[in-house]
Image (tube, grey):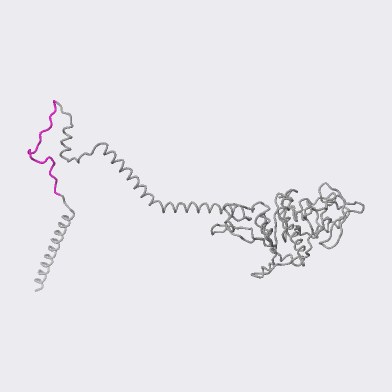
């Protein structure tokens, strides 16, 4: 199947030019009304847009989709910088071509607002819009094509990166493969005046750009991700095209493929691909790592008591077996009584000819241990305190009775 490129142009029509001895910093494009006014006002100074080429060109003023630049009479094939590749065939669907041209203008305008040099329908790379500052080819695609082949072709002609913006109604296996396999995203033009479900209806500002452009907004989604509080901390989101291009061209939002930090799903539970802010990716990775450490700590705390008991039992068994072996090697002896121990200790002392053991002070048959003093228990103390308290109560009662009798006698 022949690949189709959505350009309302022939592969024999040139649409870019420069002015002799005047550099705007970018080529003038026939598809832009302001650029075309400059071309028409300087007809005799119009030359080929390829650097170093001085081939004169003649503007052919037609409708916006058909106006172009031709070679002067007698120039034959001219410089040849108008011939496109075989994969750049024109689009025949007028509606799709109008949407395509509108998107080219919108992308070009956004890039220039952001301070980048943007060239629509860039001849060397065959890109819809080429950002010279970052060497980025921006492609608008509305139907299946040879995505990989055309990406390689643009890289061969100087593009450092090709980003595919696929329309919401583009369908097909190659479209789905390109959407998630190459740096790509879906887009849809919406009306800012609509809210709720009505916002899902596609807006068509290209039917009257002068009156409708201010109400148009381009949403980008399907492969754009943002940081959230819920695990796994990244979630798909919708973005405005202006914000998307600003973050991508500045290098803050990058294309991620096969990164373990990304959420997983689909066939084989693989990591999703998409556009992620670098700081969001780093923060999501930090949170996931923190969760892993927390889970391990919780598991270790839950398992630790059981493990400790098992280790203690194991060590106790080892120590017991070692102790038994040591005892067996020394021979088993009966327990020693205190008296025997004292006799053995005395017998073990060396005897001297000048020193005699002290004579016993008690009777021969008295016990060698001193008599222990009677022990006072807490119960004994309680009994004494109870007796004292009873005595005090009785004394107070007697005193009260005596006083009462005395008062009665006085009254009588």
The C terminus: image quadrant: bottom left
Q: Is residue 55 left or right of residue 169?
A: right
Q: Is residue 359 magenta?
A: yes
Which x, y percent locates residue 127?
75, 54
| Residue at image location 10% in from the left, 35% down from the top | 360
| 225 versus 328 height, above or below | below
Which x, y percent locates residue 184?
67, 56
Which x, y percent locates residue 278?
61, 52
| Residue at image location 17% in from the left, 40% down from the top | 338
Q: Which residues are magenta?
A: 353-374
* Magenta: main secondary structure: loop
Q: Quadrant of residue 97?
A: bottom right
| 164 versus 156 height, above or below | below
Q: Is residue 192 left or right of residue 370?
A: right
| Residue found at the far bottom of this picture | 412
Q: Nearer the viewer, residue 122 or 12?
A: 12
Q: Nearer the viewer, residue 50 or 405?
A: 50
Q: Is residue 279 left or right of residue 383?
A: right
């Amino acid at each position: 199947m022949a690949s189709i490129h959505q350009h309302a142009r022939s592969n024999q029509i040139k649409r870019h030019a420069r002015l002799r001895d005047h550099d705007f910093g970018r080529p003038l494009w026939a598809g832009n009304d302001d650029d075309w006014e400059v071309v028409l006002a300087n007809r005799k100074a119009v030359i080929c847009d390829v650097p170093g080429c001085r081939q004169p060109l003649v503007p052919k003023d037609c409708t916006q989709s058909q106006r172009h630049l031709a070679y002067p009479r007698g120039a034959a094939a001219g410089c040849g910088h108008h011939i496109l590749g075989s994969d750049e065939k024109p689009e025949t669907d007028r509606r799709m071509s109008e949407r395509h041209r509108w998107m080219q203008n919108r992308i070009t305008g956004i890039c220039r607002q952001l301070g980048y040099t943007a060239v629509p329908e860039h001849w060397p790379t065959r890109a819809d819009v080429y950002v010279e500052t970052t060497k980025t080819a921006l492609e608008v695609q509305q139907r299946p094509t040879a995505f990989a082949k055309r990406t390689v072709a643009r890289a061969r002609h100087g593009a450092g990166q090709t980003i595919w913006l696929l329309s919401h109604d583009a369908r097909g296996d190659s479209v789905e493969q390109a959407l998630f396999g190459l740096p790509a995203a879906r887009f849809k033009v919406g009306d800012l005046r609509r809210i709720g479900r009505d916002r899902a209806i596609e807006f068509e500002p290209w039917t009257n750009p002068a009156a409708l452009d201010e109400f148009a907004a381009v949403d980008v989604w399907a492969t754009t991700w943002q940081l959230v509080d819920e695990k796994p901390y990244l979630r798909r989101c919708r973005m405005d095209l202006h914000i998307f291009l600003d973050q991508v061209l500045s290098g803050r939002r990058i294309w991620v493929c096969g990164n373990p930090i990304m959420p997983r799903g689909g066939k084989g539970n693989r990591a999703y691909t998409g556009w992620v802010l670098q700081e969001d990716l780093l923060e999501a990775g930090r949170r996931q790592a923190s969760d892993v450490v927390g889970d391990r700590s919780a598991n270790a705390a839950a398992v630790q008591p059981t493990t400790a008991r098992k280790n203690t039992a194991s060590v106790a068994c080892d120590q017991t077996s070692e102790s038994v072996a040591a005892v067996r090697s020394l021979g088993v002896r009966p327990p020693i009584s205190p008296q025997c121990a004292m006799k053995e200790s005395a017998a073990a002392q060396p005897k001297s000819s000048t020193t005699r053991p002290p004579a016993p002070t008690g009777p021969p048959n008295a016990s060698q241990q001193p008599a222990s003093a009677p022990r006072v228990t807490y119960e004994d103390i309680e009994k004494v305190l109870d007796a004292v308290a009873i005595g005090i109560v009785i004394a107070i009662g007697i005193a009260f009775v005596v006083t009462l009798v005395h008062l009665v006698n006085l009254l009588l």
